Amino acid sequence: MRTKLQIEGRARDLAMFNLAIDSKLRGCDVVAMKVEDVAASGYTADHATVRQKKTGRPVRFELSEQTGQAVDDYLKAANKKPGEFLFTGRPGPERSMTTRQYARLVSEWIGSVGLDPWLFGTRSLRRTKATLIYRRAGNLRAVQLLLGHTKIESTARYLGIDVDDALAIVEQVDV
């Protein structure tokens, strides 16, 4: 999907896709981001912190080099300034993209690469990096912190891990 967006020169969509993957944020938080959340100095930072709408908790995340480049390219092409929403919607530049607009866009991306939009969506983007981190490190607590979950059981359920297995792993790590 990333390659397709790059080839098609869709700077906004590429920045949004990469940012959604790296941030592991819910769709409502992705669309609510402002320029200064990721590029306070005019260029994309290595790390960012966003306060989640659902929990009110701040979540810190790392921006990969390719995400930083995609966001920088988008900021330049769209002439975005601090104080503005990163991704604006149809009503005008002073309003963020709606979660519904974002979901439609993600469905379009998914369909364009031959996947079923009924099986994948905005939540798939949030879950992607979290799942990869869990598979590589086996550290459920780290994934819990990255997703901003308050309960380890929620994280296990979110990743599709049996709660008993997850708790056994956590007990081994915390000893």
Image (cartoon, grey):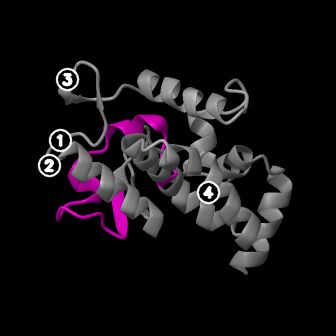
Q: Earlier in the sequence, mark 4 or mark 3?
A: 3
Q: Is residue 110 magenta?
A: no
**Secondary structure of the residue carrying numbered label 1:** loop
The residue beneath circle 2 is: 81
Q: Which residue is at the front of the view, 132 or 51?
A: 132
Residue at x 61%, y 57% (from the top left corner): 129
Q: Which residues are magenta?
A: 23-49
Q: Position of residue 157 (x, y in %)?
A: 73, 45
Q: Residues within 10 Å of mark 1 (few under 14, many from 20)?
A: some
Query: Quadrant location of the C terminus?
Result: bottom right
Amino acid carrying mark 3 in the image: Gly
Distance from Cα at disc 1 to Cα at disc 3: 11 Å
Other residues around mark 2 within 10 Å, as few (<14) / some (14–19) / many (≥20): some
Q: Residues within 10 Å of mark 3 (few under 14, many from 20)?
A: few
Amino acid beneath label 1: Glu
Residue at 78% x, 46% y is 160
Secondary structure beneath dot 4 equals helix
1 or 3: tag closer to the N-terminus: 1
User: On the picture, is 119 further left or further right than 51?
Assistant: right
Query: Which residue in the structure is indicated by mark 1?
Result: 84
Task: Classify mark 2: helix, strand or loop.
Answer: loop
Q: Position of residue 97 (x, y in %)?
A: 33, 29
Q: Dot 4 corresponds to which residue?
A: 129
Q: Are marks 1 and 2 in contact (CB under 8 Å)?
A: yes
| Amino acid beneath label 2 | Lys
Q: CA distance from mark 2 to mark 3?
A: 15 Å
Whether pointer 4 and pointer 2 mark residues with C-beta atoms closer than 8 Å, the reply is no
Residue 10: quarter of image: top left
Q: CA distance from mark 1 to mark 2?
A: 6 Å
